Image (cartoon, grey):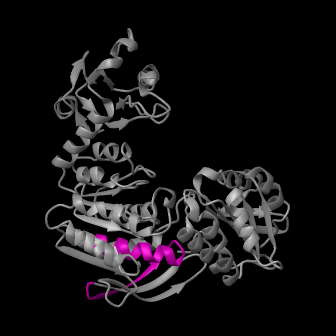
Amino acid sequence: MSLLWTSEAMIEAMNGRPVGKLPEGITGISIDTRTLRQGEAFFAIKGDALDGHDYATAAVAAGAALLVVAEAKLPALGKLKAPMIVVDDVLAAMTRLGIASRERSHAQIIAVTGSVGKTTTKEALRHVLSEVGKVHASVASFNNHWGVPLTLARMPADADYGVFEIGMNHADEIRPLVKMVRPHVALITLIAPAHLGHFKNLQEIATAKGEIFEGLVPGGYALLNRDDKHFKLLETLAREAGVEHIKSFGENARADYRLTKLKLHGECSCMTARLAGEEVVAKIGAPGRHIVQNVLAVLGAAHLTGADMAKVTLALASLRPESGRGARHTLEVAKGTFTMIDESYNANPASMRAAIELLAAATPAGKGRRIAVLGDMLELGKQAPKLHAELSSVIVANHINMVFLGGPEMAALKAAMPVEFHAEYRQSVEELQPQLLNTIRAGDVIMIKSSKGTGFSQIVKTLLQKYNTVEPAGPAE
């Protein structure tokens, strides 16, 4: 296997001190001994709850080629015989390595932020760009103060494309991260109510997201959602940051990457779009209007990096929803099967609306019903009751047959539902789950959606354990 970094280059980049006989180099970087692979470097990062130095012995046992440890922690490691690079602070050293990685890279770099759709867009970019070159992208949602430098440090020197997700809960979080990433394309998916508990309003969220423009390389592109109510504000922020090239995507007639025709199906979508004057027709393997919006952003970003758009467009047909973000499962039940749509990774009002519309587009079999299983949307602050209650009209308008609601915040939605509507409410996942299990029948389509912290993914696990999987309910090729 080729080396990601030579030990010599790591020492120089991190301003480290070698201890013991170091290997020629490392094949990867790990901060978790549970997933560490032979030949990787283990960075003993100290987090809020855990200190990586406590796992140094486990890292050596797992096959770490070398350890990166803090000078102050060296005495506590005792007689551990392992090659080490000793640094002032492990996270700061990893950040320096990430910056060195960016400096040596010739890849086209795309940075993605937004209130919703970040990870879906990042994964779609990974998928389509893999058809035209070597892609390096963030793992899972590694989008914070340690996830971004870790992803940078892991970028191979010969990558053709780098795709980085950058998230935030507060102002001034994106700014230092994007200045490390230095993207050629800075993409904002959509501004929506998320993390409102930390901001006064959506304008403040948009302004914080706009920090992404400050890291663009000279001559780089800002790529914005023309259908977003905050487009003008974001455009102004980009110009104030010195961005010369501002492009847009969406259904708006003035969008550079514009949707012109769309046919939504239960398990895929077919669309026609104009990309900088050229018309393209594409099948998208993952269903939902919100996915189409993300795909327009993907096509725009790919086009701006100079990718082969014929190959990129064809790759959309094999796009599949991620686990927790729309993945579908066909499960056996008495007298047939039912479909589960797993949207349990996260939720805010915009993504909740999109998931309900996704359920509405699904076709139950026989006497099956469309059932929404919804948990609390977190971090919405004082607006939480109002934003939960407003989902009532969305549910009714989309002809959902039944809802199961769980969590303290969902009490506001239960109270807002029409009296004649079948809505089950319980305070917790544990109380709600038996009610759902007693209701499922053949032909049902069940969509599970909530913020990650509510534990609604447990319902997904229970259904997958209790019922046999027939096959993934993906679109036919």
Q: Which stretch appears magenta?
A: 276-303
From the top left corner, tell me how far across and down residue 319 is, in percent. 47, 68
Q: Quadrant of the N terminus?
A: top left
The image quarter containing residue 41 is top left
> Is residue 44 found left or right of 256 in the rendered image?
right
| Residue at left offset 33%, top offset 24% | 69
| Residue at left offset 62%, top offset 70% | 386
Whether 433 is drawn above or below 277: the answer is: above
Residue at far left of view: 218
Whether 278 is drawn above or below 386: the answer is: below
- Inspect this view and state whether residue 331 appears: no
From the top left corner, tell me how far across and down residue 257 is, in percent. 32, 82
The image quarter containing residue 325 is bottom right
Whether 28 is drawn above or below 384: the answer is: above
Please tell me how many numbered marks the rendered image carries. 0
The image quarter containing residue 78 is top left
| Residue at left offset 73%, top offset 50% | 465
From the top left corner, tell me how far across and down residue 74 is, in percent. 33, 16
Q: Nearer the viewer, residue 356 or 419?
A: 419
Residue at far top of view: 79
**Magenta residue check for 422:** no
Q: Nearer the viewer, residue 46 or 138?
A: 46
- Inspect this view and state whether residue 469 appears: yes
| Residue at left offset 23%, top offset 75% | 246
Q: Nearer the viewer, residue 348 or 34?
A: 348
From the top left corner, tell me how far across and down residue 42 is, in percent. 37, 30
Q: Nearer the viewer, residue 284 or 406?
A: 406
**Magenta residue check for 301:** yes
